[in-house]
Amino acid sequence: MKTEFGKLPDGRTADLYTVRNAAGAEMKVTNYGGIITALKMPDRTGRMADIVLGYDTLERYLKDTPYFGAIIGRYGNRIANGRFDLNGKTYTLAKNNGVNNLHGGEVGFDKVLWGAAPFQDETGTGIVFSYLSKDGEEGFPGNLNCRVVYTLGEDNSVRFDYEATTDQPTVCNLTQHSYFNLAGHDNGDILQHQIQINAEKFTPVNENQIPTGEIRSVEGTPFDFRKMTTIGARIDADNQQLKYGSGYDHNWVFEGGAKEDLKLAAVAYDPSSGRLMETWTTEPGMQFYCGNFLDGSLVGKGGVKYQRRSGFCLETQHFPDSPNQPGFPSPFLQPGEVYKSTTLYKFRVK
């Protein structure tokens, strides 16, 4: 079902698409930024709740949003000092996060109007989003032709399939920035949620939240989530890395397996509702962010004030600052190559 969501400042219309499965799960998504505005999943009693943070109106997304629910690009996460070198040329980007470029710059993929085509097939119901990021947009080289498919499965899964091609060498790192609260978006903080992250290493950062280049073991640190652990148990521990991120806002590193194979990256669980969320991805890394910079100033759906740590993000990705870190997985895309990435969120109860 398609309805009008609102008007952009230039007069164009943003649409809102509602897709449901036979089990009653529901996803609402707008072609402005590919934003998931609502995602309803059942708890252990079958009661539905909206488990993503967001707004009721387009106007609020246009005014002030920390990337709630959006497609992120052309480069997800931070690029140090808003610059990188490619084939002997330095490309200068916006510094929209202190001294860094964050999530594509001033007008990233979260703030553009995507082409949208609804579909229904044997895999589920969803939307095919398309966007041409023109050469020089936000300082990035090459015309980048992007296609992102959102699919709500009959098994209460949400799948994201990303594809991109370019006509010049460029960088590409696409992800999805939904903030989850498995108890319901209006249900306080996520510190009692539990999470397991199937990673033995993470990338420590400096005071500007840029990776140092080291890939460090999680052993003996507050970053060891190899066993199911309550999110709030160590989030305020006396640890320099946690101080730099005001809590968890770091990239975990996944080892092994072919790039095209989905691997189980993380499992999140809310004991109060019984909702459980598995994250599967083809990506080599994942940013686990706990809404540390939410402060109650943003009024979301139904008048809810989103306080600190009222949602968590699992942003599957290439590592932050990879264009400047030769030891990290390469984010460079060449003409003739196809950027491909898949992430799958599976929801169930226990």
Image (tube, grey):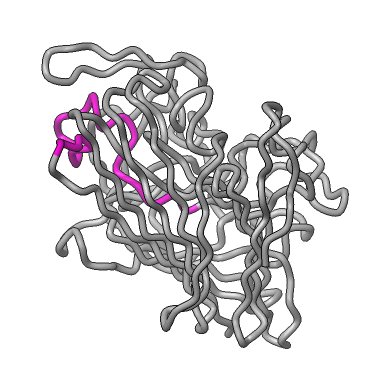
Residue range in magenta is 314-335
**Of 2 and 346, which appears nearest the observer?**
2
Q: Residue at x 42, y 65 (%)?
A: 279
The picture places residue 69, in percent across and down from the top left corner, at: 59, 49
Q: Is residue 35 magenta?
A: no
Classify residue 138 by image quadrant: top left
The quadrant of the image that shows the N terminus is bottom right
Q: Residue at x 23, y 29 (%)?
A: 170
**Of 200 and 147, which appears nearest the observer?**
147
Classify residue 332 by image quadrant: top left
Q: Is residue 327 magenta?
A: yes
The picture places residue 228, in percent across and down from the top left corner, at: 46, 68
Question: Is 78 positioned to the left or the right of 49 in the image?
Answer: left
The quadrant of the image that shows the C terminus is bottom right
The picture places residue 229, in percent across and down from the top left corner, at: 50, 64
Q: Residue at x 56, y 70 (%)?
A: 269
Question: Is 220 positioned to the left or the right of 56 in the image?
Answer: left
The picture places residue 61, in percent across and down from the top left corner, at: 70, 38
